[in-house]
Amino acid sequence: MEVLYGLHPVEEALRAGSRQFDHVCVARERHDQRLQRIIDICRETGVRLRFEPRDHLTKLAKTAGHQGVVAVVREKALLELEDLLDGPEPRLLLALDGVEDPQNLGALLRTADGAGADGVILTERRSAPLSPVAVKASAGAAEHVPIARVVNLSRALEQLKERNLWCVGLDERGTMSYDQFDFTSNCVLVLGREGAGLHDLVRRHCDHLLSIPMAGKVASLNVSVAGAVVLYEAARQRRAAQTQPKAPAIAKKKAQKGLGS
């Protein structure tokens, strides 16, 4: 069992129905509409409620930032890579190559959900777990966005290529600006580690390397900010494409190759 804490994460987990709840603890001292909404959902769905002193919740969550609610739940079941490919095309996926900060992971999950990404790919090793801190930072988005975990990201990218997805890495050494790439086809955006960026092998498996032009003295953005910039550019392009006639798939592929040359 593990814990979730915070108003948004607990409420979204209850609404999503993707977790098995043991019980939800709420602080006796807090009385307001936001907490009452969680209490009402628990009663409607048959989830056990416990009213406890705030200090008990702090010990349970191991932080005072629980906002008066802590849920004891089973670990979230993650998906297989193939599961992220089920659904209408074009698919937009986000792959994280060793993002280790749970705050960054949570922020990226929140952005992926907001930008309409079809799923997020995490690695089993050398990456932040889907911890209570990451879930809290996602503001509940972790309960809604499909997440798959893979052993080897390079091998996963090869599988995605076989399914006709463009593998696009974000790298400060990339020769193409992120807003020059056509995100309206099937693609996976690959983001690297804080500071070090993409692993060499992962970088070599990318069809294109994109960069974000920087006008100041700093060479790059925080990974969660950079991910937000590019994902929302992809979302913008896809919204615009819905109002325009679609280009033939062969012509689009040729145009994409031309950008990468």
Image (tube, rainbow, N blue to C red):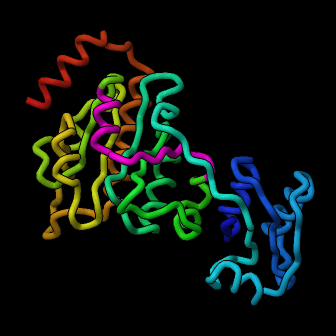
Residue at the extreme front of the image, as rendered:
151
Left or right of 138 on screen, residue 202: left
Residue at the extreme bottom of the image, as rendered:
55
Q: Quadrant of the C terminus?
A: top left
Q: Residue at x 42, y 54 (%)?
A: 124
Q: Quadrant of the N terminus?
A: bottom right
Q: Position of residue 239 (x, y in %)?
A: 44, 30
Q: Quadrant of residue 167?
A: top left
Residue 152 falls inside the magenta stretch = yes
Q: Considering only vertical position in the picture, is 72 above or below 57? A: above
Q: Give 7 or 62, whichever is nearer the viewer.
A: 62
Q: Considering only vertical position in the picture, is 212 above or below 100? A: above
Residue 164 falls inside the magenta stretch = no
Q: Position of residue 88 (x, y in %)?
A: 51, 22
Q: Considering only vertical position in the picture, is 214 above or below 53? A: above
Left or right of 197 on screen, residue 149: right
Q: Which residues are magenta?
A: 143-161
Q: Quadrant of residue 205?
A: top left
Left or right of 161 on screen, residue 209: left
Q: Residue at x 33, y 28 (%)?
A: 165
Q: Position of residue 244 (x, y in %)?
A: 39, 18
Q: Position of residue 198 (x, y in %)?
A: 22, 54
Q: Residue at x 88, y 68 (%)?
A: 49
Left or right of 259 on screen, residue 32: right
Q: Give 156 or 254, whichever is nearer the viewer.
A: 156
Number of on-image labels:
0
Q: Considering only vertical position in the picture, is 202 above or below 239? A: below
Q: Give 102 or 229, whichever is nearer the viewer.
A: 102
